[in-house]
Amino acid sequence: MKKAFIPILLLVAVLLTSCSNTPKKVASQFMKSMVSHNYDEAAASCGFSKDPASRDLVITVLLEQFGDDIRAFTVTNDSLLPDKERAIVTMTLSYNNDTKEEDYPIYMKKMDDKWYVDPFTIVE
């Protein structure tokens, strides 16, 4: 019985782990980091957490794109692009200093079977 239980437990663990990294979840965690001013964690959501110079560059880009006064966000749409390696998660952002809300696309890319925010995609 123990021999059958261990492979089943491992299979369940793998399935739960693989399902937890979706574009919507990663984008939501990224935006939670931006709202709480945890920019190191936001950079990690972009895949830039190990090299300090790259991380600092990404943080600068993120602050230019989003600013530092996001109050709240709501995910309004998420779509996987045909190549299945990119996705767009649309969020409605609310800012502390403004009463209007703004829709903003978050571009995602898949690397090594994990989803990351792509801070260098140009929003047109």
Image (spheres, rainbow, N blue to C red):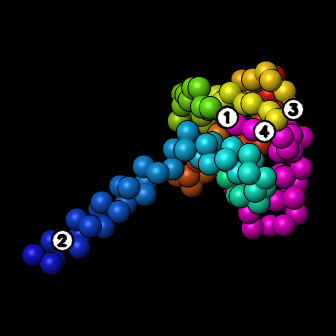
Q: Amino acid at mark 2?
A: Phe
Is label 3 or label 1 in front?
A: 3
Q: Amino acid at mark 4?
A: Ile
- For the record, the magenta segment spans 46-73
Regarding mark 3 in the picture, which secondary structure is present there? loop
Q: Amino acid at mark 1?
A: Phe
Residue 97 is tagged as 3
Which picture quadrant has residue 94?
top right
Regarding mark 2 in the picture, which secondary structure is present there? helix
Regarding mark 1 in the picture, which secondary structure is present there? strand
User: Which residue matches tag 2?
Assistant: 5
Mark 4 and mark 3: Cα distance apart in space = 9 Å
User: Which residue matches tag 4?
Assistant: 70
Regarding mark 4 in the picture, which secondary structure is present there? strand
Is label 4 or label 3 in front?
A: 3
Q: Position of residue 112 (x, y in %)?
A: 57, 55
Residue 73 is tagged as 1
